[in-house]
Image (tube, rainbow, N blue to C red):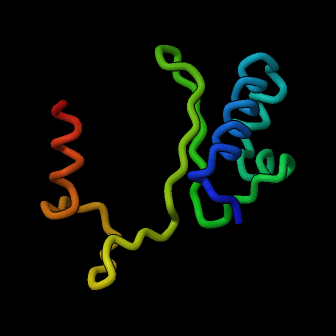
Amino acid sequence: MVDIQSPSFAEAISALVAQAKSDENIKKLLLSEPEKFLAQHGLVLSDYEIIVGEKADYGLFFALNPKKMKISSDNTKTDDSFDPQRDLNFLDCLHY
């Protein structure tokens, strides 16, 4: 399992995205099969949905979304509905 909060993971992802930006074949593989591409480079992320895309006005982007999210020990709600206790801090951060 890869520690996604480690500096070495961030460096590895940054290097792979930089390669993809400069090489069209690497970019196509990363966009079409991100799990396979990362596994080939020693980054197996089985607990995460890998989101890779490219937008004309934003460029190439990479994100991870946990497949199973544990919000608290007493509440294992995983739906996308608005939860004030969970979401207000995030909305406050967006305000700044």
Q: Position of residue 54 (x, y in %)?
A: 58, 26
Q: Position of residue 46 (x, y in %)?
A: 67, 65
Query: Image quadrant of residue 86?
Result: bottom left
Please identify the residue farthest to the front as the structure is shown. Answer: 7
11 on left or right of 57: right
Please give the name of the residue rendered at 75% of the width and 28% of the height, measured from the top-left corner: 27
In depth, the one of 47 and 3 nearer the eye is 3
When the figure is inspected, residue 50 is found, relative to residue 54, above or below; the finding is below
Please give the name of the residue rendered at 69% of the width and 38% of the height, measured from the top-left corner: 13
Q: Position of residue 45 (x, y in %)?
A: 68, 59
Please give the name of the residue rendered at 74% of the width and 59% of the height, measured from the top-left corner: 44
93 on left or right of 2: left
Q: Position of residue 76 (x, y in %)?
A: 33, 79
Please give the name of the residue rendered at 50% of the width and 61% of the height, measured from the top-left corner: 66
89 on left or right of 70: left
Query: Image quadrant of residue 93?
Result: top left
In the picture, the quarter occupied by the C terminus is top left
When the figure is inspected, residue 60 is found, relative to residue 84, above or below; the finding is above
In the picture, the quarter occupied by the N terminus is bottom right
